[in-house]
Amino acid sequence: MIKHRNVAQGEGGNAVALTLLGLAVAILAGVVVLYFIGRSKPEPIYTPSIADEEVLEQSTTQTTNPREGWRSYEDGTYGFSIEFPQGWVIATGTLSTGEPVFSVYQAVGTGTDMVYSPLEDVSHVSVYPYGAATKGIHDLTKASKVIIEIPQAFAKDYVLESGRPWATEAFFEVHPEGWGENGFVFARTVIEEEEVIYYHDDKEVSESLFDPQSGDRLEHTGFIDQNVRSVEEEILRSFRFLDADGVVVEDLLEETNTLEMIESPARDEIVQSPLLVKGKVYAVQYQGNDVQLSLETEDGEVLTEMSVVSFDDWDTQEYIPFEVSLVFDATTATSGKLILKNTYTGTGDNEVIVPILFENQVF
């Protein structure tokens, strides 16, 4: 009996201990739950004030100068300026054919100044006041989105098969004194893992059968360093013409004796019939006399011609616009030219020539 009672008393003591322990655990659990409920309490929603909105608007509308800290190069002989960033240099010289050239490129630490032709496979931006050969470049082209801030400037891109530009040519309908008629600015980025595909009538052919004169085309595949390309585009945007005092020329028409100009189509633009031609002529030089516009093939075949009739009276001393539509028969020629010429005796043989490509040409 005693033994049994002692066991019963031990069991009762254990029961009390277990009850107290359970109570302690429950209290601790409650504290923990209350702690995490407090921690998970939603943060107050912040509503910006009017002052905050004004600051936000200012920060989004502020623009930074993409050429801040860049160097500027000015040339008095050919009347231009161009900017480039740290780590880039400019070299001057002549091509193997004798034309002057100014090349901007990334410094390589060799200490040797180099100038480049458009055909050399080097990333560079070069100025060619008298032009340079580009006939070795037969890639697809399209109108460029790079805006050259010169009123009579146009630009076209050479593009990869993917459509991404790898080179840009900027040319000018009106040149400053000292430039040749074929002067231009050219930016080229190296194509990595380059592969060239040749096409004849949309069929792939070997290089030995490739003939661009018959309308064949080629395409480049590969990729470029987009950072280098972006810098080169900004260098192109920085290009300006300068007058004799080093002041930026705002309108070349006021600085030259140009009597007429074609504003559209652009140089090397692909055209078809009917072709809308826009331009302007200096009325006081003509006084109602004939201003002839003709469209010819590269071989000199005249496809169509007509006299330009202005929208305005000739009794003015301003440049006045014209807009005409040229209708012509289809041609197998791949390239041609628009010629705007005056026939007023005493003004000389003033004429403007704009090279164009016909729609069956795919460059």
Image: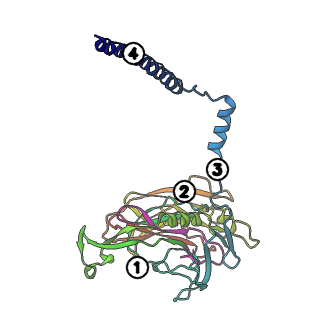
Circle 3: element type: loop
The alpha-carbon separation of the residues under discs 4 and 2 comes to: 114 Å
Q: Earlier in the sequence, mark 4 or mark 2?
A: 4
Q: Amino acid at mark 3?
A: Thr
Q: Is residue 90 above or below residue 42?
A: below
Quadrant of image for the C terminus: bottom left
Q: Are marks 2 and 1 in contact (CB under 8 Å)?
A: no
What's the mark number on residue 13?
4
Residue 109 at x, y percent in the picture: 59, 81
Classify the position of the N terminus by image quarter: top left
Q: Quadrant of residue 299?
A: bottom left
Please name the residue that numbered disc 1 is placed on: 136
Q: Which residues are magenta?
A: 160-184
**Three-letter amino acid code of the residue under disc 1:** Gly
* C-alpha span from label 2 to label 3: 38 Å
Q: Which residue is mark 3?
A: 63
Q: Position of residue 53 (x, y in %)?
A: 65, 33
SS for callout 2: strand
Answer with mark 4 or mark 1, whichever residue precedes in sequence. Answer: 4
Sequence-wise, which precedes: disc 2 or disc 3?
Answer: 3
